[in-house]
Image: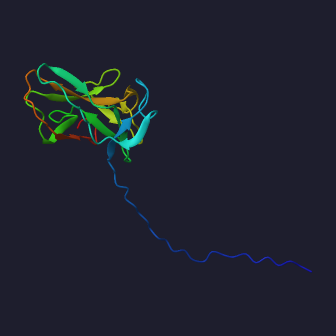
Amino acid sequence: MGITVVAATLVANYNVSSSVTINTNFTFSLVSFTGATGAACGSGTTGAAFTTASYGSVSGASASSTNSTQWCFKNTGNSAIFVGQFAPETFFAVSSGSLPSGASEAAKAWVGTLSTTANYCIPVGAYQLFDATCTSVSVPGSLVLQLSVAANTPAGSYSWTDTFHGYSTASG
């Protein structure tokens, strides 16, 4: 008995061209931080959205400052996001409502320094603020919002909304 092998011969081709566009998704959020003081963002973040900074009650008789609870950025997009002081833009701005007369609000590093003039990068999936080239961590820990109230601020209840800004490049 002999074995017969039949080999198929390629006799025709048909090409289909394909393409896809992957859109850049720039999204970030602020998440609550529950880690130890000085711990890196990401190690103690709860993932819960940080949506309210309640400063409680402060005396308007003398100048004072008070901090919000700790929070971190989280880059949930597919591209690096840049935050910082892009003149004339700012890290964040009051988008509705108003601060008490003579009051100011600033973002501060809980431990270390958050520059008021630098730009920072938040790499994809990261919680920490990197330098503007996205190569090394500049602010590893959490941030707070700090409300500073001037002496003799009028009594009352105030509410406002802050909008944080993210940019597609390190130059704003």
- Colour mode? rainbow
Frontmost residue, 163 versus 171: 163
Residue 119: name its quadrant.
top left
Q: Position of residue 134 (x, y in %)?
A: 37, 33
Residue 170 seen by the camera: no
Which residue is at a point 86% across and 77% down the rendered structure image?
Answer: 3
Q: Position of residue 116 (x, y in %)?
A: 23, 25
Residue 136 seen by the camera: yes
Frontmost residue, 120 versus 92: 92
Residue farthest to the right, as pictured: 1
Give above or below for 91 relative to 7. Answer: above
Q: Quarter holding the N terminus?
A: bottom right
Residue farthest to the bottom, as pictured: 1
Residue 137: name its quadrant.
top left
Q: Is residue 69 left or right of residue 158?
A: right
Residue 87: name its quadrant.
top left
Q: Quarter holding the C terminus?
A: top left
Which residue is at a point 40% across and 61% down the rendered structure image?
Answer: 20
Q: Position of residue 132 (x, y in %)?
A: 32, 31
Give above or below for 91 relative to 1. Answer: above
Frontmost residue, 119 versus 149: 149
**Tag count in the figure?**
0
Q: Is residue 93 left or right of residue 83?
A: left
Q: Position of residue 16 (x, y in %)?
A: 47, 70
